[in-house]
């Protein structure tokens, strides 16, 4: 996940990379992601997340709940457990990933401690 403007509504918020039925819809906010699922009448969805401390997983699980409440069969899974060939069976694929940050600063990949 990343912060930015939703490509559909323009809201400045946390974004989800969204693809529906092989079409990349870009980076959308949570509400527009759900609208895309309804618009395309997606029957099966998967939320793929990558997390180190669990925060991204909690957000991904809440999106999973929202999709299920919208009547969409949804699976939420850690990226390391995904079989790429299995993704073909999903109508909606959401990818969530966290930003390595500490006190408002991005932490470089591989850094042992946060920047000062």
Image (cartoon, rainbow, N blue to C red):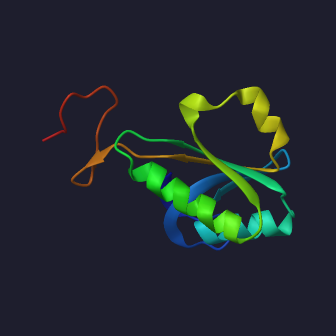
Does residue 108 appear left or right of residue 21 in this picture? left
Vertical position of residue 13 compared to residue 91: above or below: below
Residue 30 rendering spot, x and y as whole percentages: 60, 66
Residue 80 rendering spot, x and y as whole percentages: 55, 29
Near-viewer residue (4 or 15): 15
Near-viewer residue (109 or 63): 63
The total of numbered circles placed on residues is 0
Does residue 31 appear left or right of residue 37 in this picture? left
Residue 51 rendering spot, x and y as whole percentages: 43, 41
**If the image is split into quadrants, where does the C terminus sit?**
top left
Name the residue at 85% across, 49% down. Answer: 21
Name the residue at 60% across, 72% down. Answer: 10
Residue 52 rendering spot, x and y as whole percentages: 37, 39
Near-viewer residue (11 or 34): 34
Name the residue at 84% across, 57% down. Answer: 43
Q: Quadrant of residue 64?
A: bottom right
Name the residue at 84% across, 40% down. Answer: 89
């Amino acid at each position: 996940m990343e912060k930015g403007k939703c490509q559909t509504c323009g809201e400045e918020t946390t974004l989800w990379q969204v693809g529906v039925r092989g079409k990349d819809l870009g980076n959308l906010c949570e509400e527009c992601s759900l609208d895309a699922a309804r618009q395309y009448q997606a029957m099966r969805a998967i939320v793929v997340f990558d997390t180190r401390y669990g925060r991204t997983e909690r957000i991904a699980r809440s999106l999973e709940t929202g999709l299920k409440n919208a009547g969409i069969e949804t699976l939420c899974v850690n990226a390391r457990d995904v079989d790429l060939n299995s993704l073909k069976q999903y109508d909606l694929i959401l990818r969530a990933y966290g930003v390595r940050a500490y006190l408002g600063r991005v932490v470089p990949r591989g850094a042992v401690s946060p920047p000062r």
